[in-house]
Image (cartoon, helix red, strand yellow):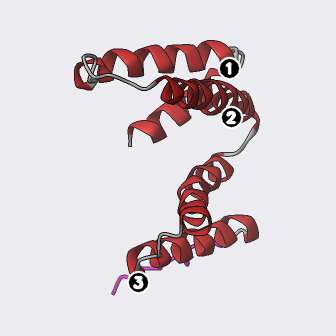
C-alpha cells in the first residue's frame, strides 16, 4: 500500500526531478529501517560489492528511470508495470535458481497476465443497472 502511495505521489510531482524524489524516498527508507539493521554483524568484503551493485543499479538507476517516466504514464500503465515486477522475480527465481513454482505463485502470475491484458485491451467492468419498481 505504501508503494502505491509513493507511486501516486511521484506521478503527481510532475516537474520534480526524479533524482530528488528517489533520494528522498531512499533517505526515508534508511531512517525507517535503521532500527532493524544488524549493524553489529560482520559483512564479508565480497558482499559489499553485491550491496553496492543493488544500491546503485536497482535503487539508484532503475528508480530514477521509473520516477522520471511516471508523470508521463497513465495510472493503469503504472499499475501494470508495478505488478510485472513480482512476475519477473518469480520467473528469474525459477529459471536461474531452480525453485519450483507453487500453486499460489502460478495463480498470481495468471491473474497478473489477465489484468495486464485487460488494461492493454481496455476491458471495462459491466455496468449494473438497478431497476426501481
Mark nearest the camera among 3 and 2 is 2
Residue on which disc 3 sits: 131
Query: Which numbered tag is attached to residue 58?
Result: none
Using the image, determine if residue 22 lies above or below residue 114. Answer: above
Q: Quadrant of residue 36?
A: top left
- Identify the main secondary structure in magenta: loop
Give the residue at mark 1: 18
Q: Magenta stretch?
A: 123-133
In the rendered image, which residue does mark 2 sit on? 66
Tell me residue 45's x, y (percent): 49, 22
How crowded is the residue under tag 1: few (<14 C-alpha within 10 Å), some, or many (20+)?
many
Q: Looking at the figure, which quarter contains the C terminus?
A: bottom left
Element under label 1?
helix
Comparing 40 with 16, the one in front is 40
CB under 8 Å between discs 2 and 1? yes
Relative to 39, does residue 90 appear above or below in the rendering?
A: below
Quadrant placement of the N terminus: top left
Residue at left 47%, top 79%? 129
Q: Earlier in the sequence, mark 2 or mark 1?
A: 1
Q: CA distance from mark 3 to mark 2?
A: 46 Å
Q: Residues within 10 Å of mark 2 (few under 14, many from 20)?
A: some
Amino acid at each position: 500500500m505504501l508503494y502505491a502511495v509513493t507511486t501516486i505521489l511521484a506521478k503527481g510531482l510532475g516537474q520534480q526531478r526524479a533524482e530528488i524524489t528517489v533520494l528522498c524516498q531512499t533517505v526515508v527508507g534508511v531512517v525507517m529501517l535503521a532500527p532493524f539493521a544488524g549493524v553489529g554483524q560482520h559483512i564479508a568484503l565480497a558482499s559489499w560489492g553485491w550491496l553496492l551493485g543493488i544500491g546503485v543499479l536497482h535503487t539508484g538507476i532503475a528508480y530514477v528511470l521509473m520516477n522520471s517516466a511516471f508523470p508521463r504514464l497513465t495510472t493503469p500503465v503504472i499499475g501494470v508495470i508495478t505488478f510485472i515486477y513480482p512476475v519477473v522475480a518469480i520467473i528469474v527465481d525459477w529459471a536461474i535458481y531452480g525453485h519450483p513454482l507453487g500453486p499460489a505463485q502460478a495463480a498470481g502470475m495468471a491473474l497478473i497476465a489477465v489484468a495486464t491484458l485487460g488494461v492493454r485491451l481496455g476491458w471495462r467492468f459491466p455496468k449494473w443497472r438497478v431497476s426501481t419498481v
